[in-house]
Image (cartoon, helix red, strand yellow):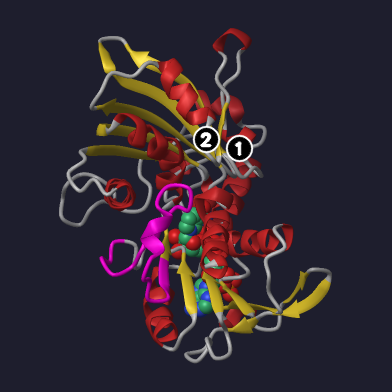
């Protein structure tokens, strides 16, 4: 079995390589692919050196399975032909997620969506996965009818260049912390990735505003669409707000969820305790709750702050934190690959 990672030099691709090693994925050859910029770069896989190749139009020849994290434009150009030629492609980009012929899969939530796939499988958005790991089992138990989310998204969600941009801005502002009480906003560092100062700030715009003028961003619209597709609830109302925060790795999501039947926090905790891939960290009396930094480097999505809303016994509020590069991207893709191979 020859397995490629297309986008092997990126934030998600590097994590995919690490996970294939960690999880002892059954493969005979590992093929790292990226853009022409990285051709010849030396990486290591299972202790052996491997050389990055540029992904040309025929990149898929001899490749059985590809884990892809090279952005939407590359996916649209390079994946349909590869899938037709028989290479199973698991794509992390938004390019095919809402295509009705392409399964959008979280293995713990909707593995049945893989039935009859046509070699092209989509991995969900990192925030959608973080929210759905607890919401999926809660929906099965209590019937989700209404959802509001606010996400606190780390800068690595925009690729490793996002982390570099945050680190550079913090460095530039070193020693000037007091001036941030009365900043000259135009003089503050603002990079190309975030478009605004992200150090010591939060930016309530992830991706771009909806060109159709809804006032939502494309990230916020994706979240609702993907949640509806994965849960199979086409009419579920979802209102999302997505905010970039100066965190390196790990997304947080604050959730308000209303259900078709009454549910207590204790019942929700029981359901979440039994849910694969979820760890409940919820003990206010001991100051236990999840944060993105607790989730970074871990496979499970962490859930805490589970509480009843004041006036409604059908609604709960909670906070989830997950590693956007692992469960939000690379781990979910590797888990899909494991399911496909085991079938
Ligand atoms: N970061 C996250 O948390 C996250 C979560 C879920 C999904 N995703 C999705 O995963 C994808 C990659 O994200 P990332 O964060 O890993 O981005 P990244 O760090 O910017 O990495 C992008 C990767 O794509 C490669 N690439 C770019 N243009 C290419 C081309 N023309 N041909 C072949 N390879 C090309 C890059 O290679 P070079 O190094 O040679 O440029 C690099 O390996 C995106 O679609 C993103 O939406 C990301």
Residue 136 versus residue 332 in the image, above or below:
above
Whether label 2 touches label 1, CB < 8 Å: yes
Vertical side of 236 occupied by 194: above or below: below
The residue that mark 1 highlights is 295
Q: Left or right? Give the position of 133 relative to 205.
A: right
Helix, strand or loop at disc 1? Answer: helix
Residue 337 found in image quarter = bottom right
Label ID, residue 321: 2
Q: Position of residue 181 (x, y in %)?
A: 50, 23
| Residue 145 visible in this rendered orientation of the protein | yes
* Number of the label disc, if any, that sits on residue 103: none
Q: Which residues are magenta?
A: 98-121
Q: Nearer the viewer, residue 132 or 76?
A: 132
Q: Is mark 2 within 8 Å of ligand 1?
A: no
Q: Residue at x 60, y 77 (%)?
A: 4
Q: Secondary structure at mark 2?
A: strand
The first of marks 2 and 1 along the sequence is 1
Q: In the depicted view, which residue is nearer to us: 91 or 33?
A: 91
Q: Is residue 171 left or right of residue 202?
A: right
Is residue 113 on the magenta stretch? yes
| Position in image of residue 52 (x %, y %) | 67, 80
- Considering only vertical position in the picture, is 134 above or below 166? above
Alpha-carbon span between mark 2 and mark 1: 6 Å
Circle 2 Cα neighbour tier, 10 Å, few/some/many (<14 / 14–19 / ≥20): many
Asked whether the viewer can see residue 182, the reply is no
- Quarter of the picture containing the N terminus is bottom right
Q: Residue at x 40, y 52 (%)?
A: 110
Horizontal side of 91 relative to 335 (left or right) equals: left
Q: Position of residue 308 (x, y in %)?
A: 36, 14
Left or right for 216, reference 267 = left
């Amino acid at each position: 079995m020859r397995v490629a990672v297309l986008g092997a030099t990126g934030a998600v691709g590097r994590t995919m390589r690490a996970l294939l090693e960690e999880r002892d994925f059954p493969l005979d050859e590992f093929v790292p692919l990226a853009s022409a910029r990285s051709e010849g770069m030396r990486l290591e896989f299972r202790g052996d050196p491997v050389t990055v190749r540029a992904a040309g139009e025929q990149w898929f020849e001899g490749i059985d399975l590809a884990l892809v994290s090279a952005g939407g434009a590359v996916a649209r150009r390079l994946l349909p032909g590869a899938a037709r030629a028989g290479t199973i492609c698991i794509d992390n980009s938004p390019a095919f997620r809402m295509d009705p012929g392409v399964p959008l899969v979280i293995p713990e939530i909707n593995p049945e969506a893989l039935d009859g796939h046509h070699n092209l499988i989509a991995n969900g958005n990192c925030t959608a996965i973080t929210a759905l790991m607890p919401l999926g089992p809660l929906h099965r138990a209590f019937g989700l009818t209404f959802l509001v989310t606010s996400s606190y998204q780390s800068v690595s969600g925009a690729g490793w260049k996002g982390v570099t941009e945050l680190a550079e801005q913090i460095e530039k502002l070193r020693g000037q912390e007091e001036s941030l009480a009365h900043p000259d906003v135009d003089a503050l560092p603002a990079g190309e990735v975030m478009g605004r100062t992200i150090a010591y700030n939060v930016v309530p715009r992830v991706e771009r505003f909806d060109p159709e003028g809804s006032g939502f961003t494309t990230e916020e619209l994706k979240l609702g669409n993907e949640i509806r597709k994965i849960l199979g609830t086409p009419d579920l109302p979802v209102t999302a707000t997505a905010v970039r925060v100066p965190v390196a790795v790990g997304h947080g999501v604050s959730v308000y969820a209303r259900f078709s039947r009454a549910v207590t926090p204790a019942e929700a905790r029981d359901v979440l305790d039994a849910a694969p891939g979820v760890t409940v960290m919820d003990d206010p009396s001991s100051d236990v709750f999840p944060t993105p930094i607790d989730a970074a480097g871990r496979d499970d999505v962490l859930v805490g702050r589970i509480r009843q809303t004041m006036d409604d016994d059908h609604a709960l509020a909670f906070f989830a934190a997950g590693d956007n590069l692992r469960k939000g991207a690379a781990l979910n893709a590797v888990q899909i690959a494991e399911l496909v191979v085991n079938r």
